[in-house]
Amino acid sequence: MEHTNTVNASLLSSLSPIFITVVAYFMLHERITSNQVIGILLSLLGVLWIVSKGHLGTFADIRLNNGDIVLILSNVLMAIYSVMLRKTADKLPGLIGFTLIVFAGVITTVPLMMLELSYRPVQLFLWENLWSIAYLGIFSSVIAFFCWTKSVHFLGPTKASPFMNVVPVFATLFAVLFLREELLLSQIIGGVLVLLGVYWSSRPKKSLASISSTNPQVQELKL
C-alpha cells in the first residue's frame, strides 16, 4: 500500500477468489461447478462496480506499479495458504493448527521486522496507536484468520473464496454507519452483485469438470 493506490489495491484484491479457485483445482483436484464460476464472476463485478462508482471504464487507465506486483504475489501466496489449510485440516485441526501457523509467522516476520528497523526509524509504541494495534492484532488477525481457517475446513477453498469479496460491502456499510458517508447507488448495486455472487457460488450443482475423473477421493463439498 506504500507503492500503489486504493483503486489498484481493491481491484487486485478482488481477484483472490480466482487465484484460490485455480490453485485448488491443480493442488487439490477440487471440482469447479458452473455455479461457482458464475458466482465468482458476479462477486468480482460487484467489487469493481463499488470501487469504480459504477464507471468500469476507470480501470482502462490503470497501470501496474511495484506495489501492484507485490499485491499479485500476495494473492498467489494467499491462494496457496488457503489450499494448504484444507490439506492439513485432518492432521492439524482447529486451534492446534492455527496456533502453529501463528507461531511460524512470528518466527519468520520478527527477523524481517528487525532488519527494517535497522534502516527505518519507527516509534513502535505510541499510546495514540495502541487501540488500533490491539484491534489489528486481535480481531483483524487472530479472530479473522481463525474464522477463515474454519470456513476453509468446512467449505473448501473454492466455495469459501467468494466470501472474500464481501469485505468492500462491509467497508461501505461501516463507512455509512460510523463515518456518516453518503451511500451511493453504485455501492448498492455492487453490494447486491457481490451477495448474489456469494449465494450463487454456494448453490450445489453437478460439477462441469475435474482434473482427475479416476480419483475416487475427489468429491464436491455440499453446503
Image (spheres, grey):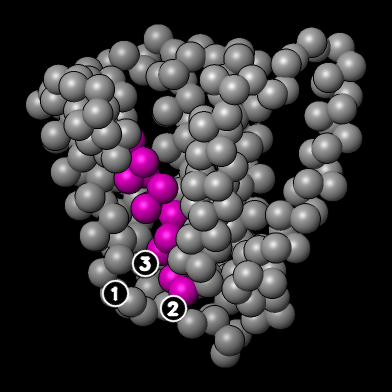
- Compared to residue 119, the image places residue 35 above or below, namely below
Tell me the residue that label 1 is attached to.
204
Q: Residues within 10 Å of mark 3 (few under 14, many from 20)?
A: many
Tag count in the figure? 3
Task: Label 1: state its secondary structure.
Answer: loop
Tell me the residue that label 3 is attached to.
33
Q: In the rendered structure, find residue 220 and report the number of the disc placed on it.
A: 2
The residue sitting at 52% across, 30% down in the picture is 132
Left or right, residue 134 beside residue 17: right
Mark 1 or mark 3: whose residue is earlier in sequence: 3
In magenta, the rendered stretch is: 154-168
Q: Does the magenta stretch include residue 146?
A: no
Left or right, residue 103 beside residue 12: right
Q: Is the magenta stretch mostly helix, strand or loop?
A: helix
Of the pair 13 and 40, the residue shown nearer to us: 13
Q: Do the residues labelled 2 and 3 touch (CB within 8 Å)?
A: yes
